[in-house]
Amino acid sequence: MNLFSCAAERLTELRERVTYTGKTLLERSRKWRCFSTKPPSNCDVVVTFERDTREEQVEWLSNRIQARIPELIFTKTFHRGTQRIALYLTCSFKDLLKGAQEVRLRKRLIADLGEELQEFCIEDCENFEGVFDQEKFFTSKERQTIVRYYLMSLRAMAGDAWDDHTQFSHGQAINDNEKGKPTYDFLMNSSPESYFYLLPVVFLFLVPVLLAKGKIASIFPLHDREALMDLQQSWVRGFTHRQPLDAVAEYFGVKIALYFAWLGHYTTFLLAPAIFGLFSWFLVSTTKQGALYYPVLAFFTMVWAVFFQEAWKRTNNYYTHRWGTLDKSPSLLEEPRPLFRGALEPNPITGRLEPFYPRWKRNLIVCFVTIPITLICLIIIVGVAVGHLKLQELAEDKFTNSSIPGAKMIVHIPMILYAVNIAILNEVYRKIAVKLTELENHRLNESYNQALISKLILFQFINAFYASFYIAFYRLDLDLLRNHLVTMLVTRQITGNIKEIFLPMGQTRIKQVLLTLRTDGLPTLKKDESPVPGLNEEESETLDPDSPARKISDVKITRVEQEEIMPVYDDATEDYLEMFIQFGFVSMFTCAFPICGLLAFLNNILEIRSDAFKLLTNFQRPFAENANGIGVWEQAFEIVSYVAIAVNVGLIGVSGSIQTIIPGLTSYQNILILVAIEHILFALRFGLSHIIPPIPLALERSIAILEHKRREALKARETLQREERKEARRISDENCEQDYPSDVTSDIDSH
């Protein structure tokens, strides 16, 4: 009896503990959900510093911002939860107008002028829609773009020094250039990159260098909670609705909106190979009629890839014209990358001093550093792939016909491990590719991104498809190829979703819990007491300020701190890479595994919403960027479509379809027929890509109408200026006649 009563007491005690723990966790969960959602006043962009940053260093940077960038308005703040000092940056409306002109921001004209997007000009500000409404004329995206432009334009000067290891010094170069002009040296003392350059390393801008060196922890714009809620409702939850691409471009910028436009376009086009492949998978027999489906699927896939890419060019031009980014400014007029290094020389167009780095030196680094390291990485990939394939062969020999329970599952383990190793190698090589691209020292962000993406594409292509090529063309085993494709597609989709959604979400949730625990454990602060002397305390939606004392646990953690702990969304490169590999599987191996298109289509229906979800909830808001297309990815997909023709023809040969359709062929005749088919498909692919115009007729007319209006407006302005000059000359002549004496004017008339 005592035993039962003791057990009952223990159960009661355990139940109470579980209840208390649950209430505590629920309270903290509620506390997190009740954290401040009120945006801080006068804040568009946030700069946070590392925890070991001294107040004097923050003061040093603040003084330079105040002296050299007077357009910026900033407030120093201490975040209690994250224990970081932060700067909240914004601009006045007048300085926003000035910045809009400097960044060539496109704004919509008034209805009388056609409501087209045009670069903003202060002199013609009355021609732009809503310019007199200071609260609504600039969107949050535009304000953040302008503030970031001002911040990143903070230039280094002689004597600038963050600390003993991060100094900016001014002086003569080791040697002058051939024109006799001195070069200037803003040299990072601890920078090993200088050994790879044959000229002094020049850093013109302070903030990007401090960010790259880890002195500044992060620079990020704040989310607009109201816009986020609207996008979640219409974008993430609206499975049956079209993507709100205009709203995405308005909030995240054109570059990200173009990715989702491309993804939606690609998913729509996947419906054709999904239906056709499913039909082939179920209805085609293994007899002579079944042998036809390899050539038919190969031809269908080639035509599908051509129409998909050419239709995207037309769609891309439609959206970029709609969003005002169809035209591309000349590269010499664009600002160099903040971390671009070189000797200072005047820009041949603008005349401004900019870093200059000769192309031959970049080519030297590419030939003797980038290419050898890339080849070594590719050799490692091939070695890892061969090792897993040999392990796969060993597993098949040992367990295919084995009576051991679960033996059939063991056969698939090497391929699952290979897919996981691919994901690990991709992350390692990405870091190597970033270092190599930084070493190449590209002037523009566009060329930097193209060089980086080209390396990643090459690595990913070999890493993802080497095993498939090995099985198809070395082992000549199409059944094993199908099993391999199933394993790769499913495993990549699972690992991709874990890496893209669940890892960032888990990291954010862990940081939220740690932030809550850290805040709960901080000591009591009295009224108006600041943890760092001289800094203001951000206390949005705190307790009653008349309270004599308050615990930090009673103070809501600010919205800025919530966003500060979120991971940074770099760009859509990883998403493009995932789709690039998927497109390769669909275009190259559909004839061997017809339901590739169906698996890709089903995955992408979820991919659109999952990518939108992670962008809205898991990451800091990225700064908006403009683009006139998807860049180097367009060329990458075209190259894969050409490679796919050769691969499909090879699979036709491996399947024996030609011998089944035309019995009695010799090996030589079979090869000749395959080569002829390949050349016909190449010619057809090339012809179709040139027949379909990249710009729709309606868009051409719209562009022509806009150009006609622009020319007419220019003529009208020139006519008005001529009339004004004539009127000014007439008034000037009348004034001169009035100034002359009457006898002088009579003498002039007589002569």
Image (cartoon, grey):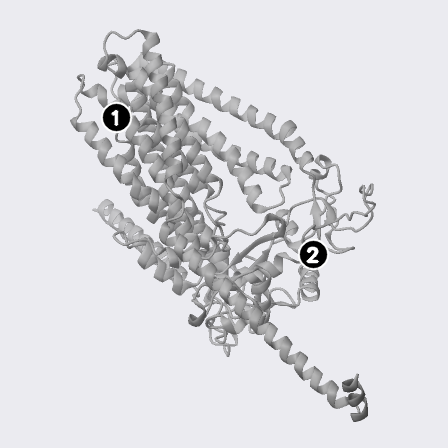
> Could you classify mark 2 by the number of other residues whose Cα lies within 10 Å: few (under 14), some (14-19), or many (20 or more)?
some
* Residue drawn at point x = 56 percent, y = 52 percent: 329
Answer above or below: position of 680 versus 427.
above
Q: Report the side of 29 relative to 152 (left or right).
A: left
| Spot occupied by residue 71 in the image (x, y as percentages of width and height) | 63, 67
- Observer-nearest residue: 469 or 345? 345
Identify the residue under disc 2: 155
| Spot occupied by residue 421 in the image (x, y as percentages of width and height) | 44, 28
Answer above or below: position of 479 versus 125.
above
> Could you classify mark 1 by the number of other residues whose Cα lies within 10 Å: few (under 14), some (14-19), or many (20 or more)?
some
- Observer-nearest residue: 344 or 339? 344
Q: Amino acid at mark 1?
A: Val
Q: Earlier in the sequence, mark 2 or mark 1?
A: 2
Q: Nearer the viewer, mark 2 or mark 1?
A: 1
Q: Amino acid at mark 2?
A: Arg
Identify the residue under disc 1: 296
* Residue drawn at point x = 38 percent, y = 39 percent: 309
